[in-house]
Image (cartoon, rainbow, N blue to C red):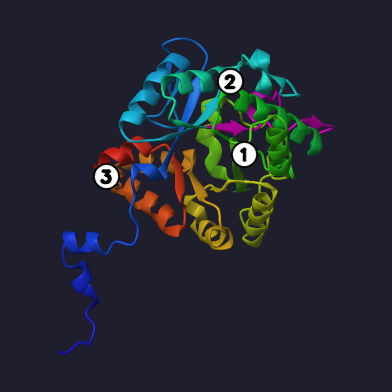
Amino acid sequence: MYLQRRNRILRKSAPVRSLVSETTLTPNDFIVPLFIDEGENVKTEIASMPGYYRNSLDVTVKEVKELWSMGLKCVLLFVKAKDELKDNTGKEAWNADGLMQRSIKAIKDTCPEMVVMTDVALDPYSSYGHDGIVKDGEIVNDETVDALVKMSVSHAVAGADFVAPSDMMDGRIGAIREGLEESGFTKVGIMAYSAKYASCFYGPFRDALDSAPGFGDKKTYQMNYANRLEAIKETLQDVEEGADIVMVKPALAYLDIIREVKNAVNVPVSAYNISGEYAMIKAAAKMGWIDENKAIIETLTSMKRAGADLIATYFAKDAVMLLG
């Protein structure tokens, strides 16, 4: 049989496949989320995220040193606030001596070149577990944005390289950019959670930080997962308001959105491989239904192939070791 084109020639061996691979993962692609708690020598495994931990700051600093030694260059910080510090204003979020602010300083003191990104949202500090201030059962927008600006500036004062607003309030990127500029932080970037969907896959994350909403859900500010064009609109607006990096969250069920956003913007695109996606692979692997290591690399590759320049993932350390 004569064939003009034999496509399998480019798949015949591992070296050939490597030569023509269109997508390559490296440690430079990963953002490492870190959960931080008060106390000393605390390392608490998150039940719904096997193998992942909420650590005290002293343990976190050691972890950051290890991450840097592995070639991982960026961390994204989340803190667990004590219940007695939570209220409806979120004022602990901009406490100069708060856990987030101390964590930023400690990490930058220990590993100055590590890129430190910080979560900006009120849910860890809210007595209601919502990303904004609540009035008469409604999550109000503009007062929340004012609080987010204070929070962002406090992170910049502590030494953050990027603030990462994850709240999905209207106009917060422009307001944060203005607040940073007016405070003299012209080198602090914004990684905007631009297309953050109201997803069922966030459950384990909320276990990690005890930040589940105390009433209702987050559908009045997080996006409807049925919508595609809305993601582009939201992302373009964030870019116009000054976002340096835009994010799609979740990742695995939203690969089409990652590609749409990548095609629409001229700034780096990140994707968040979230806690529920992590938990699914862990659970299936525990049952012997999938090969965990292969599933990690395949799913992360799919996100980069879809257009993600950066991937926030709980599998970052595993991926680096698997990539060799």
Q: Which residues are magenta?
A: 117-138
Kindly give the residue lying farthest to the top in the view shown: 40
The picture places residue 268, in percent across and down from the top left corner, at 52, 51
Dot 2 amino acid type: Gln
* Residue 77 to residue 323: above or below: above
Whether residues under marks 1 and 2 lie with C-beta atoms below 8 angstroms apart, the answer is: no
Can you say which quadrant of the picture contains the C terminus? Answer: top left
Q: Secondary structure at mark 3?
A: helix
Residue 165 belongs to the span the image colors magenta: no
Q: What's the distance in space between the residues labelled 1 and 3, CA to CA?
A: 30 Å
- Identity of the residue drawn at 24% across and 76% down: 7
Can you say which quadrant of the picture contains the N terminus? Answer: bottom left
Mark 1 or 2, nearer chain start: 2
Dot 3 amino acid type: Leu
Give the image quarter of residue 61: top left
Q: What's the distance in space between the residues labelled 1 and 2, CA to CA?
A: 18 Å
Left or right side of 127 for 289: left
Give the image quarter of residue 149: top right
Mark 1 or 3, nearer chain start: 1
Which residue position holds label 2? 101
- Identity of the residue drawn at 61% across and 54% down: 225
In the rendered image, is residue 131 in sight?
Answer: no
Residue 132 belongs to the span the image colors magenta: yes
Which residue position holds label 1? 166
Front position among marks 2 and 3: 2
Which residue position holds label 3? 323
Q: Secondary structure at mark 2?
A: helix
In the foreground, 181 or 25: 181
Q: Secondary structure at mark 1?
A: loop
Dot 1 amino acid type: Ser
